[in-house]
Image: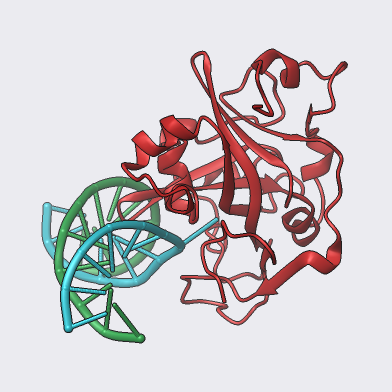
Chain colours: A red, B cyan, C green
Amino acid sequence: MPLFKNPEVFLSIKNTQYYIVKREFYTKNTIDVAQKILGMYLIRKLGNTVLGGQVVETEAYLPYQDKASHGYRGQTLRNAVLFGEAGYTYVHSIHRYHCIDIVTEGSGKAGSVLIRAIKPIEGITIMKAFRNKNNIHELCSGPGKLCQALNIKKELNGTDVTAKNSEITIISNNNEINPNSIGNSARIGISQAKNLPLRFYLKNSLFVSRRS
DNA sequence: CCCCAGATTGTCT
DNA sequence: GACAATCTGGGGA
């Protein structure tokens, strides 16, 4: 049975076990957000259909001192949303793909959490079509892959994930992940600050971008 | 304008 | 594990 049969169920805050995560959650320490968002659900509304899955892998990009952060050299046209309020998407392109972050901390600090992988749950058939792949483990096991599976492009940069009518939201059922089941490593694919242990993932998940 | 690096992925060895 | 494909934003001239 689908977890999210009717979009309005989880988009209505008051009467469901799943609720849209509030802005307050994101307006905090980026490393905490990167860990606590694990186990929550990234939801993409596409007309009447719903795509989404459980967040199983993230990376923290820190304010001020993080040379790997896109905000490190200051605000530009591309990264402007990073310098705004928390709880908005930062969608950017890299090579042929896109990546999606959620802005954290306070305005002007440019903290964010990169969503690196989700476990596909809803709209799997459609995600397979967007990805042109049939193997469920190849759908969302990487930042570029999941954006392709969810049809997330730069037009969705700056989306408020805390607003119920947004095309991208994050919902939770309040089940906290046991800290013991969270793995930690250096971030992947960067050339600066490559030793900082700012990648977080669910140890037992088969849907992360890399299994070690 | 031109140049180039980059938070990637798919394919091949 | 290595590497090509591919493209956009930003910095320098």
Q: Is residue A58 visible?
A: yes
Q: Is residue A151 visible?
A: no
Residue at position x 50%, y 36% in the image: A157
Q: Compare residues A176 and A109 and report the one nearer the observer.
A: A176
Residue A45 horizontal/vertical position (percent): 55, 23
Instruction: Indicate whether A107 appears above or below A163.
Output: below
Question: Which image quadrant is residue A26 in?
Answer: top right
Q: Compare residues A123 and A90 and report the one nearer the observer.
A: A123
Residue A43 horizontal/vertical position (percent): 61, 32
- Left or right: residue A18 versus residue A127 is right
Q: Compare residues C5 and B10 and report the one nearer the observer.
A: B10
Residue at position x 58%, y 48% in the image: A118
Residue C12 horizontal/vertical position (percent): 29, 69
Rendered-image quadrant of the C terminus of chain A: bottom right
Question: Which image quadrant is residue A53 in?
Answer: top right
Residue at position x 63%, y 58% in the image: A57
Rendered-image quadrant of the N terminus of chain A: top right
Instruction: Indicate whether A106 appears above or below A187.
Output: above
Q: How many marks?
A: 0
Residue A151 horizontal/vertical position (percent): 42, 34
Residue at position x 65%, y 78% in the image: A196
In this view, which residue lies farthest toward the front?
A: A1
Q: Compare residues A209 and A196 and report the one nearer the observer.
A: A209
- Left or right: residue A191 versus residue A201 is left
